[in-house]
Each structure stands twice: as structure tokens, then as C-alpha cells.
Amino acid sequence: MDFKEAKKRASQLTKQIRHHNELYYNQDAPEISDFEYDALTRELKSIEKEYPELITPDSPTQKVGGAALKLFSPVAHAVKMESLQDVFSVEELREFGDKIDNTKTVFSVEPKIDGLSVSLEYDGGKLVRGSTRGDGTTGEDVTANLLQIESIPKTIAFDGALEVRGEVYMPKKSFLKLVERQELLGEQPAKNPRNAAAGSLRQKNSAVTASRGLDIFLFNIQSIEGKNFDSHIESLDFLKSLGFSVLPFYTKCNTIDEAIYEVDRIGEKRGEFEFDIDGAVIKADSLSYRKTLGSTAKYPRWAVAFKYPPEEKETVLLDIEINVGRTGALTPTASFTPIQLAGTTVSRAVLHNEDFINEKQIGIGDTIVVRKAGEIIPEVLSVSCHCENSVVFKMPTHCPSCGSPVFRAEGEAVIRCTNTDCPAQLLRNLIHFTSRDAMDIEGLGPAVLEQLVDADLVHNIVDLYTLDFNKVMALDRIGEKSTQNMFDAIQKSKQNDLSKLITALGIRHIGTKAAKLLSSRFGDIDGIMNATFDELQSIDGFGDILAKSTLEYFAVEDNRQMIKRLEELGVNTKSTKTAAGDRFAGMTFVLTGTLPTYTRAAAAEIIESLGGKVSSSVSKKTTYVLAGEEAGSKLDKANALGVTVIDEQEFKNMIN
């Protein structure tokens, strides 16, 4: 292409790569695979190589893609945390080998763990700080969350200052457990272990991090006081002697040919590992020679990362099964002739949704192409050959679990079952009903609810209020005291405000805020059930979608009968909230950061009881921003717009 075309294409690629960098590094929610992302980057590099005048200092090829988030305190790295140059062929590996003087160094080869790069700093034998890579020069202080990873030593037998670099990752078994849990709770499941690990490490609540089963492998000494090493492998052996969880294997190779052989060997075995890898790293082992080679603006010249292409195979589609999720979503799953992918036998893969099937024109009997996303979850990519008389698969019109009609909401790709009592949705509905924001029934967590369902003691939410004490106590791991506490919590929940019951019902699009608006406007459940569309739509803060969802829910006779039964069992269906005053009438508050004594929920309740509104976003219409510690972008926006910012003490003064 000529210069004009190259400039235009480079601009397009830069915009695309920055978009995907933001999703991958900062939001942990990628839209494309690593292979597709690498293809974009390689194309941009190729253009910049042909037209060097198009290279700019802020080009994605010249800087690390991540950034330090404002959620955590920034950490300036004393030693830059560089990224690695990616290569994709044996020829490129040989080119790298040709640039290395083999008389001055051997090579080391190690797996490239697919996780989040972090720095650990020790002083006087104690872990004093941990941070993410960020953009390579500035990261985020995530010390509290790194302390939750059991394999990170809190103390070591070395008194000097030491900074080490490692990769926090999520083991495959932990990832599959997390995805299962997220699907059970109706949450968007993590796409791959890398993003799951990154998201888990960037939690404000370190208890969440602790529950995710994260682990770490160390792969480098960034700096060390009072000790010198000749080689990289020697430094890793030293870290291992201190009790660090170092890379599970690293191999010394005398020539680039030996290194290439080791790269191939790792690639063949990658499906057997309990952790996800996205390549292998080849490094010059001599540390003094590394200093001679130096680095470019973005990469060290003494190392490259070989990226394995995603393994894809063809197979024959035998059937398409429909699974009903906990939210009523109907998900098609392909069943096909078993194939070997990434070291394991695969016979089933996700087909996403109806649109995907129609787009790919997938029919039973067709030959399909399958790969493992993130080397773990199988997915169908395309149809390579249609069978004779192939017919595109049609999604069912009725739920395969309960036989009820299904529907597809406007603007959504998912088809859902209309029956809220559908057996496939039962556990998810129970978990939501008993959750803190809903009926807040302590002692009825997901594990206990699953036991109740498996024991055939609960078939719907009404059954929670008619449980047999002795039958519950007879279940495994549930004693008399636990059972009594559970029953006390169930009785206590009957006195909840109407808004909590509305939240608990799980009406589509109706969360805690909308439930409070309904409760405040109508006062009791009968008023809500018999409200017209115009009445619902007229509520300030309510729109067409919320009004329509409310009408549709209460139009189902089974739902009305369920509420009648709850009333008969003593569950409160009236608003218990009375306005404490109107001093905040007409005011809109936004809450951000951690307050010294109030929780955000408690502060919001006070504001609403005094006639004010609580919004989730800052605008020119915002009256006050109530800010606590570690306030983020909302505080910045408030200052930019000139919105008044108050702290908790000022808020208390306003209340009193």
C-alpha cells in the first residue's frame, strides 16, 4: 500500500488496539481473542516498519497497554516492568537467536504464564508492598489483596531490600469453579483465567480476592541489595531457596535449536498443566550480557515470547442440546464427535445464542471447527462443510425444562423461559430471594439452599416459609443450632419493608432503587400489582422499560398467587418506611469512596428518608457528592463540573 493508505490503516489499527487495550488491561473484559489481538498488533508493526515516519511515541507498539487505575494508590516502579516482544514462528525465533552472541550466553526457556504481572517488595525480611505492572512505570498498590494469596511469603530469610516480579494467575480448577458460581448467581461469567485473575486482584474488598483461589509464579529479580548473580537461572534457584513459588520449570539451552525444541515440548504439554499459558519465553541467561544488549522503548532485546497459535480441529456436529440457565436463559450446546484439543478429549462446546447459529448457518450433521478459548472452554468457531440437505437449527418455542413458552426481549440476544417457577431457575431464584439486598435471610447461603433443593424440601420461594425443622436439621453439616438460627432469620425476614420483598421477587430490571420507588409510590403490594402503565411510568426515575417489566411480572397469575400465599404466611407486603422529613427534598446525592462510619447503603437510606434522591452518576443536576476515602472518578467529575463535595462530618451536620 502507498503512504496515504498506510497512514489511514495505521490510524484505524491504533484506534482498535487502544480500545482492546482498555478492555483487556483495565476492564478485564476482552472482546476478542489473544490471537486476533496479536494479528492487529503485527499488522501495525508491519506498517510502521515499512513507513517509520508513522511511528509516534504513543503508538501501541511503543508502550505497554495497561494503566494504573484510580481505584488504588499509584506506585512508581523503581525498575521498569517491561513487556516482551512477541514472535509467532520458528523463523522469528531463529532471527532472535542470530542477534544473540552464543559465546557470551546460553538461553533459558520457561512457560509464559497467562495472568497479571505484579511486583513484590521486601525489606528487612518482610513483605512491605505489592503492586501491579500498570503501564510499566506506574502501577497500582494492591498489597492488601496480594496478602490473601497463600503462596506469597509474608516473611523471608533475607534482610536486604529485594524486589521480585511474578505472575498472579488463577488455576484452571479455580477458574471453572468461579464460572460455575457466576452462572449460578446470574452474573456474567469470566471469559478466561487471565481476566478472572486480574479482576480478582483488583477488588476493593480483599475478602473477595481471598475467595478466588489465586496463585503466583515468580520469574524475575528486579533488584536485590548486597547480592549478585551471574545468570537468570541462578537467580531463580535463589528465590526458590527462600521459599518463593517460582516458575514450575525453566530449562537451560546451549543453542537456539535446543531452545526451539524446548518451546515445542512445552507447547505439546500445555493442555496438561493446571495453569493456563499463552506461550513460552526465551531469554539470554547471562545477566551481564543482558545489560550490554539493553532495551528498546518497549521491549528488552535479550528476550522474546513465542505465542502458540490457538489449536483448532474439525469434527461432525451430532446434536444441539438446550440448557436452561439459572436466569431462565436458553443456551445451545453443541455435541460432536470427540476430538483432542490442548491435551484433553472434547465432545461438547458452547454455541452462544440464536444469532450465532443463524450467522454461521449451523445445522446438525455439519462439519464444524472447534477450539478451546483460553485453552480451557471449548467453543464452536464456524462451519467448514455443510452436510447434504443441511437445515439451520431452530431454537425451541417452549422451555425444555418446564414446557412454558419462551421469549426474546427486544435488543437482547438471549431467549428466556417465561416461567419464574421453572425447575432450572429454582436455585438461582432462591439465592437472589435470600440475598442481603433482598430478604436478607442469614444462614440460607447458596450451599444450604442447594442442599434444600436436592433434598426435595424446597420447590419455590414460598416453601422457605413452610420448612420442617426436623427435616432441615437432618441434612448433612446442618446442626440444631444452625437450623434454629436459620428459622429465626426466616421469621425475621417476614417483617422486612415492602421494598425488600419487591427486590427479592427478581422482576427483570427492578433492582433495589426501583423497588424503593415502587414501595414509596404505592405503599402496598396490591397498589403495585394493580397499577396501570401510565401510573408506573409517571414515577420520577421510572421509565418505559421498568414500567413494562413490572406490568408483565404481575400479569402472570402464578406470580400473583405466590404473593397471596406469602401474605397468608405472614410476610409483610406494606411499606414500613415513613419519611423522617423533607429537608433533602429536590436534592440529588452521589456517594463515592469509603465513609468513616456509615456504609453507603446506610447513608443512602438516610438521604431517601429525608426526601432526597441518590444517583449513581455525577451530572450538572447533582446537588452534593458525599465523598469518603479512595474516592475515584466521580470525585474528579464533581470537581470538574463544580458540584459541591462534602465529607461525612458535613453530611452529619446537614442531618442534624
Image (cartoon, helix red, strand yellow):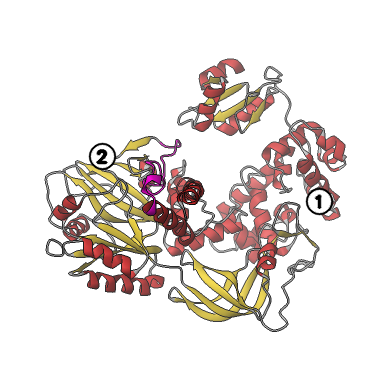
- In the displayed structure, 260 sits above or below 490; it is below
Residue 135 picture location, percent across and down: 37, 43
Mark 1 Cα-neighbour bin, 10 Å: few <14, some 14–19, many ≥20: few
Q: Position of residue 256 (x, y in %)?
A: 23, 69
Main SS of residues in magenta = loop
On the image, which quarter does residue 471 sit in? bottom right
Question: Which segment is the magenta one?
Answer: 50-72
Task: Report the quarter where the C terminus lies.
Answer: top right
* Label drawn at residue 498: none
Q: Residue at x 48, y 67 (%)?
A: 376
Quick one: 236 or 18, which is closer to the camera? 18
Task: Kindly identify the amino acid type of the residue bearing the numbered disc 1.
Answer: Arg
Number of the label disc, if any, that sits on residue 565 = 1
Q: Quadrant of residue 353?
A: bottom right
The residue tagged 2 is: 78
Q: Nearer the viewer, residue 368 or 450?
A: 368
Which numbered disc flags the more N-terminal residue, 1 or 2?
2
Query: x and y percent of residue 55 in the render?
Result: 38, 45
The quadrant in which residue 321 appears is bottom right
Q: Is residue 628 magenta?
A: no
Q: Tag 2's secondary structure?
A: loop
Q: Is 244 located above or below residue 607 in the figure? A: below
| Residue nearest the viewer, comparing 64 with 320 | 64
Q: Secondary structure at mark 1?
A: helix
Q: Position of residue 492 (x, y in %)?
A: 67, 42
Q: CA distance from mark 1 to mark 2?
A: 65 Å
Mark closer to the observer (1, 2): 2
Q: Amino acid at mark 2?
A: Ala
Residue that protrudes farthest toward the front in the picture: 2
| Residue 249 visible, this orientation | no
